[in-house]
Image: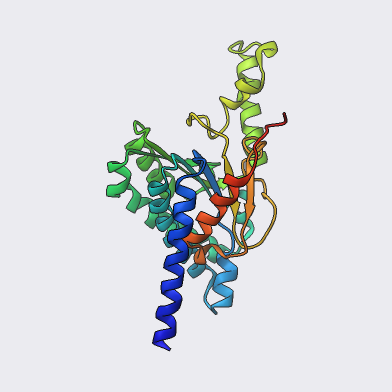
Amino acid sequence: MLKKLLSVIGAYKLYEKWLWLQVKNGAKLEHIAIILDGNRRWALENELNPWLGHKKGAETVEQLLDWCEKLGVKFVTLYTFSTENFRRSPQEIEEIMKIAQEKFRELLTDERIHRNKVHVKVIGRVNLLPESLQQLIADVEKATENYDNQFLNFAFAYGGRAEIVDAAKIIAEKVKDGELNLDNVDESTFEKYLYTAHMPKQEPDLIVRTSGEERLSGFLLWQSAYSELAFLDVYWPDFRLIDLLRAIRTFQTRKRRYGT
């Protein structure tokens, strides 16, 4: 049994190395966005409470950040909790918020974040989150606001329609107050008021969704107009480096014409 297991691990490592060599020399990804789906189903299949799936998923995020650093991906946006997720049971929401607090507290002193000058931002309706979590998020954002080597965004209490509505409201107020001329409002103006406006590159090159579902579920509706999409049949807690490399390899084989 042990011999067979070692054989499988060896084959995995060889495949991983082969994929890495392929991807390394292909077109570079600047911005990757991932919908972290399947935490609850992973927990159910492993006969665990739902929040233990979220906890395992949070650990997978830490691995992902290491992989993206090695691949030279400058912008990473992760869909972690939607506005619709507030409809879940109070106990599950409470546990998710506890996990978020723990992880943001770790980010505050994470040596990798400060060594690599990673700008951390939470995009979404942060005001809907518990006050203690809001303060922790503000502390992390303040500590990294001057970094610009890499950008790490957590879409938390996020909804794509909500983002567009919020941007439209800000623009409407500015037009009303005379700060903006209605005739000058165009796509580039609108993008200045999206949650992702702090980034030089708002549009993801590639959006990945795990768990086998094939929809965006409101994720980056404006920004994803020309993004390539990859849907993977793996739950987020089980996401491996080879899954990321295969998604990137798929991206590299596509011809991006941008409507031309």
**Which residue is at 56% across, 47% downward?**
157
> Where is residue 240 drawn, in percent x and y?
48, 62
Vertical arrangement, residue 85 with respect to residue 197, above or below: below
Name the foreground residue: 57 vs 82.
57
| Quarter of the figure that contains the N terminus | bottom left
> Where is residue 68 drawn, in percent x and y?
43, 48
Q: How many numbered marks are there?
A: 0
Q: Quadrant of residue 246?
A: bottom right
- Residue 63 appears left or right of 50: left
Name the foreground residue: 185 vs 70.
70
**Which residue is at 68% across, 59% downward?**
213
Vertical arrangement, residue 253 with respect to residue 186, above or below: below
**From this viewpoint, which residue is outermost toward the right?**
259
> Where is residue 258 drawn, in percent x and y?
68, 32
Residue 109 visible in the current orientation: no
> Where is residue 180 drawn, in percent x and y?
61, 13
Name the foreground residue: 196 vs 213.
213
- Residue 21 appears left or right of 49: left
**Which residue is at 49% across, 49% downward?**
23
| Quarter of the figure that contains the C terminus | top right
Name the foreground residue: 14 vs 141.
14
Residue 168 visible in the current orientation: yes
Color style of the picture: rainbow
Q: Quadrant of residue 41?
A: bottom right
**From this viewpoint, which residue is outermost toward the bottom?**
1
**Which residue is at 34% across, 33% downward?**
147
